[in-house]
Amino acid sequence: MMRGERTRREILEQPDAFAKTLSSTEEEVKRAADAIKGRFIYATGSGTSFHAALVLQRAMSKIASERVISIAASEIPYWLPDDLKETVLLAFSQSGESKDVLIAVDFYRRHGGEVVVSVTNTEGSTLDRLSDITIITRAGKEESIAATKTYTSQLAASFLLSICTAERKRCCLDDLREELRKIPEAMRNTIEMCQKRVIEVAEEIKDRDIGFILGSGSNYPTALEGALKLRETSNLHYEGFAAREFLHGPIQLVSRHTPVIIISNGLQEVIDRVKVYEAPVIEIGGDVPVIKVRDEFSPAVNIIPLQLLAYNTSLLRGLDPDSPEKLSKVVR
């Protein structure tokens, strides 16, 4: 098998995995929406799954007007309050076996937490068994260490859950549902549109050890996830930031040697500030083309060029994105 074959295949499988998750999880998502009603929501996960929790937080707040706080699973014991009555824990884990997520669920239960809803790709996993309601994503088996299709499938479940939760408040969201159904096609077209430019960008950044990815709003988590993918697969030190937060200190590290990738949505002022220091600027949604979709759903589309960038950069650096040497699929 050629280096990176699994990663590439799984990136290309994302539109179908997203569509299957939407079409196959309606009943369990509706049960989760019923359980959420009237409760304060804590969302959690580790690594990529935590980034999915952040996307859910914004989608639930904007679409369903729900109160949500996302906390990294390993930090749950340090941040949750003592009284967890009238709350729900939404736990993300592609494997359902992440040690930190399982500890978070146990802590939540032991401190009075009443409802656990999990989003996982693994039916019958420990997390599935510990949960009151499980939303099983339909990504199929993911073999590459770096999560791609399981991440966007988690986003599909999150968007659908946000819509169903809003509908429980007697909102009519047929138009929003129709926009969500179009996301797989937008993902597919984005894959086709961006690949040529992504390969060029990979050539530009492959020998630059430090870089940054900036996003705002819905795509702040996309910046975090894109940076994680580059760290995992390419051994490059990329950091993700909320776009304007980057101006509060980290911009000190910018130079003509540090690429800055910006998920472009009204961030021209930040782009102009970065260009003052002659940093190479790459715009997702600008010189790297993507299909424009509704802002709440855009993380599922905008992550694709960043995944492809990590994949191509890894290969150009002589690495295998399928199997980063220090990582495992499940952190136990």
Image: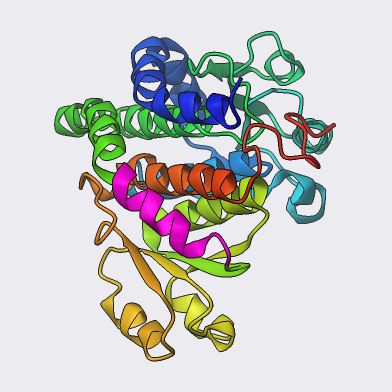
Q: Which one is in front, 256 or 80? A: 256
Query: How is the rendered protein coloured?
Result: rainbow
Total marks placed: 0
| Vertical position of residue 255 compared to residue 129: above or below | below
Please name the predominant secondary structure of the magenta segment in the image: helix
| Quadrant placement of the C terminus | top right
| Quadrant placement of the N terminus | top right
Return the x and y of residue 111 as percentages of the image width and height. 81, 38
Return the x and y of residue 122 as percentages of the image width and height. 64, 15
* Residue positioned 68% across, 16% down in the render: 128
Return the x and y of residue 35 as percentages of the image width and height. 52, 24
Return the x and y of residue 178 as percentages of the image width and height. 17, 27
Q: What residue span does the magenta drawing correspond to?
A: 195-207
Q: Is residue 254 magenta?
A: no
| Vertical position of residue 135 compared to residue 261: above or below | above
Q: Is residue 198 magenta?
A: yes
Q: Which one is in front, 98 or 310? A: 310
Decide if residue 199 is on the left or right side of residue 84: left
Whether residue 21 is visible, yes or no, is yes
* Residue positioned 69% across, 42% down in the render: 46
Q: Quadrant of residue 269?
A: bottom left
Q: Quadrant of residue 324?
A: top right
* Residue positioned 50% across, 63% down in the render: 205
Whether residue 66 is visible, yes or no, is no
Decide if residue 129 is on the left or right side of residue 151: right
